[in-house]
Image (tube, rainbow, N blue to C red):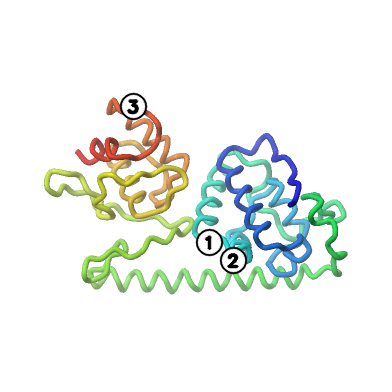
Amino acid sequence: MAQWKELPDALDEPGRQFVAELRRLKSGSGLSLAALADRTSCSKSSWERYLNGSYLPPAVVVEELARLGGGDVDRALALRSLAEDSWSAGGGAGSAVTPDALPGPGDAESVGPADQDAAPAAPSRRPARHTALVAATVATLGTLAAATVFLVSRESSGAVNGDDRRGEKAAFVFEPGRTHACDIHREDGLLHAGHSDTRDALLQQISTSWDVVEAQCLLAHRGYSPGLVDGAYGAETEKAVKRFQEAAGLVTDGHMGPHTWEALRR
């Protein structure tokens, strides 16, 4: 098992959770840093920086690692999104994203002894990896464009916010940066936002679901901004819940449960 470096003191909790997930996925892949670089879009030295919490990796790289490590891609991307918010607010240890061509100290691996038996790195293939990263980015943009056309066509046919024509909710898939519209209305005397009818779902970091979208919409409607309405229960959503709980005279634990739902839907 790799002996990981201690994380930088400047890294806050969302960043630490994200780096811990990266390390877990790296261990699950069974690959050395050199082998990981050969099978992904970034270099060995960049992987060293990502796994030591110095820089935030691009989303496409996180997805590659999640697949290699047999992890949950949605969870990994959700954790990255929360860490990115933290990095942007000054809670990260380094730059939001490090260029793959950024030179390192001899490209040496300092992650831990488990990687020391890796074969010497092959001659630099950064231009090829850079091309691969650009191609992956272009493909991602193409996918997003296609998804936008698909959503517009669904909305024009009456299928919005993940609902199909029969009114059934599509499975929630977290997409970094995507936000959801809120349809605030009252039904049977209770407040709804059009994403979930739950009155008892237990939500806390790092939940991702339509229930979270519903809670974020209702919090924003009541004046307690949760940040982005993206379906990821992060630090901003937890703070909004705590403020609402305090104002409603509830236990201020930052978790969504039956009592908080009841107060939120009144």
Q: Do the CB atoms of the residues marked 2 and 1 lie less than 8 Å apart?
A: yes
Q: If you read the primary sequence from the N terminus, does the residue marked by circle 2 or circle 1 appear first?
A: 2
> On residue 246, which mark appears?
3
Check disc 2 and report its element: helix, strand or loop.
helix
Q: Which residue is mark 2?
A: 67
Looking at numbered disc 3 in the image, what kind of residue is underneath it? Glu
Q: Position of residue 29 (x, y in %)?
A: 67, 63
Looking at this view, is 153 or 24 the one in front? 24
Q: Nearer the viewer, mark 1 or mark 3?
A: 1
Residue 172: image location, x then y, percent: 38, 60
Q: Amino acid at mark 2?
A: Arg
Q: Amino acid at mark 1?
A: Val
Mark 1 vs 3, N-terminal side: 1
In the displayed structure, 159 sits above or below 247; it is: below
Residue 43 position within the rendered picture, expressed as x and y whole percent measured from the top left: 75, 62
Q: Which residue is mark 1?
A: 73
Identify the residue at horizontal 55%, vertical 56% (top origin): 76
When asked about the image quadrant of residue 153, the answer is: bottom left
